């Protein structure tokens, strides 16, 4: 793996790309930002992009494309059926993952729908190293339930465990023994566990999970959406993998999996997704759902231009100098925030920098959505849009009981090859100031609460006038600065 050191000792990540196309940004004054966040119901998902300076909401569908991806989009074959573009993508998936069969879909949650419709039935269980919102929703919708079998370490905010995303083997075996293997729909491993700070699992752990699955005759499903970051961590943190190439690590992970699915909005830096498998039986079972929900088997809800870009993007993901940029920028941001005393998840994971809202605004009770309140506060003082990953991202029990999340995180995603170091430094500066004035932040309460996936489009209001007080303090300290 290539390493670049600075002669005078400064430790900063070095971009292994150059910027050739730019997009103008807008940083509205704080008074306009207050109007914008209140109009959005204090939900950063509902902000208009024109009101956002740094969009750190997600890394999904917002990664920078390479020049080769954009060039490939001009070659697209737009045939409805039998497109050469699909064949190109299918062959690239087969080459990288070694799988015989590929089913296209328009994004990751579409894959989750197809897999759940096929294999989840009432009373079945899906063990996993941690759930993701849409994954859990599809499993529950089909009558199944999610059982978390993560390490106890996974929920420790600060840890020196390099693989907090590992699945606990003992918990998995106990779960199967207690319920019976026939009740296990499949075991799911998520690369770069999204809701607990983008924490990776090790290749060794995946081998151990495979052995358990073989012992009990259970399928292993890999969510490879955040595979790029997980590959970097395996290569840089796992001793036996340091001399392996990214391609070799990828192939070993694929060989351990019965089904692999991914959102190309993350893996491949384009808009689409897919499911791959070696089993014709598995492929045949899922195939009909593609045509029912997505489209024909040679486009699956994607545009052919996006499929061209994904084929190139998957190949680029096999380059260490592509997959290392996100994690290195995230590590830099985490280190800089720690210097200012800001509570963050460690070790630095993939996907983004994760701030521990439970500690940052410890005076805000969980039923007033501290991570959501912190997201609204950060946007107000900076124009930086992050995403709540806490109680707001859960959904109530059928009787209306609020499910309190294991963690309250503000996720600041780091889309690949998008931000400059000065922009990251700006975000760090505003977060540091906000931490020093954290006592001004108050809670939120729902005024419009959807029943399912409420964090996407629910609306909330501040429980007091704390936002106006925070704005006044900003003007006092920053004067006429944006």
Image: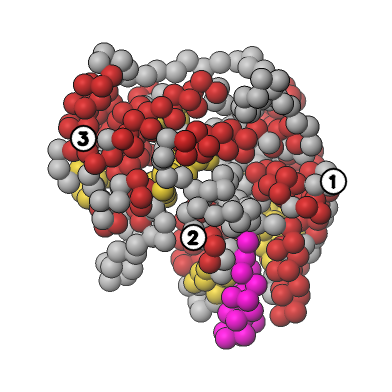
Q: Which mark is residue 441?
A: none
**Frontmost residue, 127 versus 357:** 357
Specify the segment rendered in magenta: 165-188
Q: Secondary structure at mark 3?
A: helix
Question: Mark 3 = which residue?
Answer: 467
Question: Is residue 31 left or right of 432 when viewed as pictured?
Answer: left
2 or 1: tag closer to the N-terminus: 2
The percent position of residue 464, horizontal first and vertical second, equals 15, 43
1 or 3: tag closer to the N-terminus: 1
C-alpha separation, residue under disc 3 versus residue under disc 2: 30 Å
Which residue lies at the image location 17% right of the left edge and 31% below the top edge? 468
C-alpha separation, residue under disc 1 versus residue under disc 3: 51 Å
* Coloring applied to the structure: secondary structure
Q: Which mark is residue 155?
A: 2
Q: Quadrant of the N terminus?
A: top right
Q: Is residue 52 magenta?
A: no
Which residue lies at the image location 36% right of the left edge and 50% below the top edge? 359
Q: Tell me if label 2 and label 1 are in contact, CB under 8 Å.
A: no
Question: Mark 1 = which residue?
Answer: 243
Q: Quadrant of residue 2?
A: top right
Question: Is residue 379 left or right of 143 when viewed as pictured?
Answer: left
């Amino acid at each position: 793996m290539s390493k670049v050191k600075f002669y005078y000792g400064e430790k900063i990540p070095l971009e292994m790309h150059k910027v050739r196309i730019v997009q103008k940004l807008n940083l509205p004054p704080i008074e306009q930002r207050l109007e914008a966040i209140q109009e959005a119901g204090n939900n950063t998902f509902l902000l208009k992009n024109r009101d956002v300076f740094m969009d750190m909401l997600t890394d999904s569908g917002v990664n920078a494309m390479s020049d080769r991806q954009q060039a490939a989009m001009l070659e697209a074959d737009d045939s409805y059926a039998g497109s050469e573009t699909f064949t190109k993508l299918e062959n690239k998936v087969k080459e990288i993952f070694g799988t015989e069969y590929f089913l296209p879909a328009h994004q990751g949650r579409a894959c989750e729908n197809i897999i759940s419709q096929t294999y989840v039935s009432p009373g079945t269980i899906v063990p996993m190293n941690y759930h993701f919102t849409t994954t859990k929703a599809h499993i529950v919708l089909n009558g199944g339930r999610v059982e978390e079998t993560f390490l106890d370490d996974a929920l420790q905010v600060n840890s020196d465990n390099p693989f907090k995303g590992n699945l606990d083997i003992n918990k998995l075996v106990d779960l199967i023994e207690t319920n019976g293997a026939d009740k296990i729909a499949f075991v799911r491993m998520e690369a770069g566990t999204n809701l607990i700070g983008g924490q990776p699992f090790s290749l060794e752990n995946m081998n151990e999970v495979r052995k358990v699955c073989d012992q009990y005759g259970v399928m292993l499903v890999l969510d490879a959406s955040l595979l790029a970051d997980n590959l970097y961590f395996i290569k840089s943190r796992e001793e036996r993998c340091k001399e392996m190439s990214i391609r070799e690590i990828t192939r070993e992970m694929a060989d351990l999996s019965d089904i692999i699915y991914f959102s190309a909005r993350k893996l491949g830096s384009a808009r689409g997704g897919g499911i791959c498998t070696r089993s014709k039986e598995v492929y045949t079972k899922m195939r009909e759902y593609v045509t029912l929900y997505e489209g024909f088997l040679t486009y699956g809800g994607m545009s052919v231009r996006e499929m061209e870009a994904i084929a190139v993007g998957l190949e680029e993901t096999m380059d260490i100098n592509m997959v290392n940029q996100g994690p290195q920028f995230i590590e830099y941001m985490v280190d800089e925030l720690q210097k200012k005393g800001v509570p963050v998840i460690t070790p630095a994971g993939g996907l983004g920098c994760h701030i521990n809202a439970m500690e940052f605004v410890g005076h805000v009770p969980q039923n007033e959505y501290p991570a959501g309140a912190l997201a609204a506060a950060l946007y107000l003082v900076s124009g930086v849009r992050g995403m709540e990953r806490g109680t707001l991202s859960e959904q109530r029990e059928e009787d209306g009981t609020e499910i309190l999340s294991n963690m309250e995180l503000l996720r600041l995603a780091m889309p690949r090859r998008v931000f400059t170091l000065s922009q990251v430094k700006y975000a760090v500066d505003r977060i540091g100031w906000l931490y020093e004035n954290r006592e001004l932040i108050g809670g939120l309460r729902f005024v419009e609460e959807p029943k399912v996936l409420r964090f996407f489009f629910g609306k909330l209001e501040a429980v007091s006038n704390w936002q106006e007080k925070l704005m006044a303090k900003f003007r006092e300290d920053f004067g006429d600065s944006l």
